[in-house]
Image (cartoon, rainbow, N blue to C red):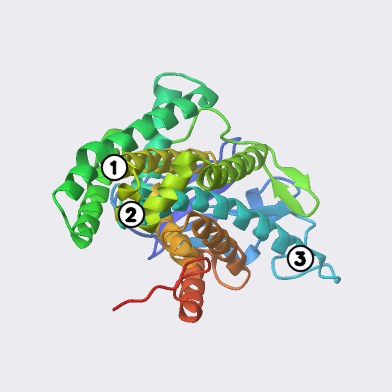
Amino acid sequence: MKIKVATDADAPVGEATTGKDGTWTVAVDKAGSYKVTLDQATLPAGKALRDPNRGTLTVQVFEGNARNVLFGLVDANAPPAGQDDGGGSSYWARVAQLVFEGLNLGLIIALGAVGLSLIFGTTGLTNFAHGELLTIGAFLAFFFNTTLGLHLLIAAPLALVVAAGLGWGQDRFFWGQLRRRKTGLISMMIISIGLALFLRALLLFLFGGGGESYDQYVAQAGIQIGPISATPKSLVAMGIEIVVLIAVGLALTYTRLGKATRAVADNPALASSSGINVDRVIRLVWAAGTCIAALAGILLGTTQNLNFQMGQQILLLMFAGVTLGGLGTAFGALVGSLVVGMFVQVSTLWIPPEMKTIGALVVLIIVLMVRPQGILGRRERIG
């Protein structure tokens, strides 16, 4: 397939031909708005654009960043987007596909949001650097996989161990010190924004601004399950996400550490007077939360190119999921994240895909107007 790139003024910039895996690259010499056109005459036999009217996409490219541009393909005999075969089957097949993709996205958001919610619940910190923990986990696995030559199935667990250590050390030598100095929560939140900027710049310096990918599981043939098309890696990833989230829920409910975590989140002073080592619990929560966030980053990296901003791009959805489910509640973060993921994907039935994140914010605002404490949050008296 041939891809043509031009400026907003229709000045040609470059052309590319996709590889066997469907990827292509066109370099631009400066930031700006560009038109990307797929030559539909060069599509493989039996394939067509999902929406023939979206053969040209306008994208914004920023300095030093790589921008992904995707064209959705379907079987040439399938009805165009928005139409059906007379019985509505094409429309409902698309709905089923979007629900599946929404569930996949919601589970990834939930992995990151659970750690974010646990940290907020035990410390009161709104950590704006949590998105970078996803990115760090993805790039740790990338380093072990591509630089050291380890298979991704070995590189990923090693990355999770290192990420857990980084989470423990982050609280031991940084956030814990700030708590002992009685630093206010507003000040710590601002510090987390600065930390996020620093980590993002560090990742840009170490790995560059281009898109990277793992050596394994980059391109896979889809599997048709009824009306849903899915790759084997996406099904495995969803299985891992479900198992981990269930394990976290069981650990919080039945283990001593889980009960201690809930006690600290409910009342740190009372938990301390009951003999619970609050600092130790918080440190373990940081280690677990960072490890889970790193897992979310690794799984996200199997479905898209790795870049230094991938955590920042999903951070807003994590905050939406945590707030929607109820601040400080891990189970609320799970429910809220699934709602956000579903709504983000399904909303593309009615709005352009480029605007789908706005849908998450709309549903967040609507729910909070009706139930300010979130879906599973508790009412609290203020003042």
Taking the image as shown, residue 274 lies to the left or right of residue 304, namely left
Q: Nearer the viewer, residue 348 or 55?
A: 348
Mark 2 and mark 3: Cα distance apart in space: 53 Å
Front residue of 8/100: it is 100
Relative image position of residue 375 (x, y in whole percent): 53, 68
Give the residue pinned by disc 1. Answer: 279
Residue 32 percent location from the top left of the image: 32, 59
Q: Earlier in the sequence, mark 1 or mark 2?
A: 2
Q: Secondary structure at mark 3?
A: helix
Marks 1/3: CA–CA distance = 51 Å
- Quarter of the image for residue 160 reads top left
Against 99, residue 18 (above or below) is above
Q: Crowding near pointer 2: few (<14 within 10 Å), some, many (20+)?
A: few
Amino acid type, label 2:
Leu
> What residue is shown with label 3?
92
Question: Which residue is identified by label 2?
Answer: 270
Query: What secondary structure is marked by label 2?
Result: helix
- Which residue is pictured at 74% across the width and 46% down the height? 45
Tell me if label 2 and label 3 are in contact, CB under 8 Å. no
Q: Looking at the image, which residue sits at the far left? A: 181
* Vertical arrangement, residue 352 with respect to residue 269, above or below: below
Residue 6, how many percent across, how many down?
Answer: 42, 57
Tell me the amino acid under the disc marked 1.
Asp
